[in-house]
Image (spheres, rainbow, N blue to C red):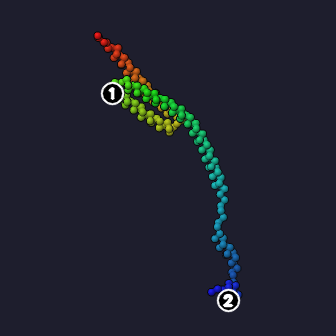
Amino acid sequence: MERDIRDLFLNDDVVEKEIPKNHREDFIKKLGKHQPKKKKNYTFLKIVASFLLIITCVYMYQNQLTRTSKSAVELQIQAIEKDYLVNIDKEWNSFKEIANDTVLIKKYEEKLREYDVDYKKITKQLKEYPNNIHVLQSLIDNLQRRLQLIKDIKEHINELNQKNTSNETIYI
């Protein structure tokens, strides 16, 4: 059923309606309701976002600078710490070689464990507050006390060994 559309409008059968007087205004209102709303001007948000971006960049830059300065201090602390720990291990091994009394060794091992527990707590505090001079001083004091304890023990054992050998006389 093919029909030409032009033929449909040739007929006068179409009833003409009279358009109301305010038809144009009503049409424009209805058309305006279905139109997308105008975008709001977000200049205030753009300014705030720019400000936050600048603040974030400055913070990241300063944070990077403090990391490099901390790493130099941390390297020095680690070097001191390593030096003390090497000396403590060396002295402890030489003490074990000299000492014959296992009870004495166990007694001093227990003291060293107590110092080691304190050392671990101080190390955690140092990681939390790397620029706190009191924590750093506590760490160094702990290492010095451990080293001094081992040296004192070793010296005491040497004195005891010398007394034992000097008091002994050999009769032939």
Q: Residue 140 location, x and y as percent?
A: 48, 30
Query: Residue at the spot x=32%, y=14% of the render?
Result: 168
Q: Disc number at residue 119? A: none
Can residue 6 be seen here? The reply is: yes
Q: Amino acid at mark 1?
A: Thr
Is 132 or 5 nearer to us in this picture? 5
Image quadrant occupied by the N terminus: bottom right
Q: Which residue is mark 2?
A: 13
Query: Residue at the spot x=33%, y=14% of the render?
Result: 167
Mark 2 vs mark 1, CA separation in Å: 124 Å
Can residue 145 be seen here? The reply is: no
Q: Residue 163 location, x and y as percent?
A: 35, 16
Residue farthest along the top direction in this orientation: 172
Q: Which residue is mark 1?
A: 102
Q: Residue 36 location, x and y as percent?
A: 64, 67
Residue farthest along the left direction in this orientation: 172
Query: Residue at the spot x=41%, y=34% of the render?
Result: 117
Is 129 or 19 nearer to us in this picture? 129
Q: Residue 110 location, x and y as percent?
A: 37, 31
For label 2, the SS is: loop
Is 134 displayed left or right of 49 in the figure?
left
Q: Amino acid at mark 2?
A: Asp
Which of the 4 quarters of the picture holds residue 76?
A: top right
Which of the 4 quarters of the picture holds residue 59?
A: top right
**Do labels 2 and 1 touch, CB within 8 Å?**
no
Q: Is residue 136 above or below residue 60?
A: above
Q: Is residue 90 above or below residue 13?
A: above
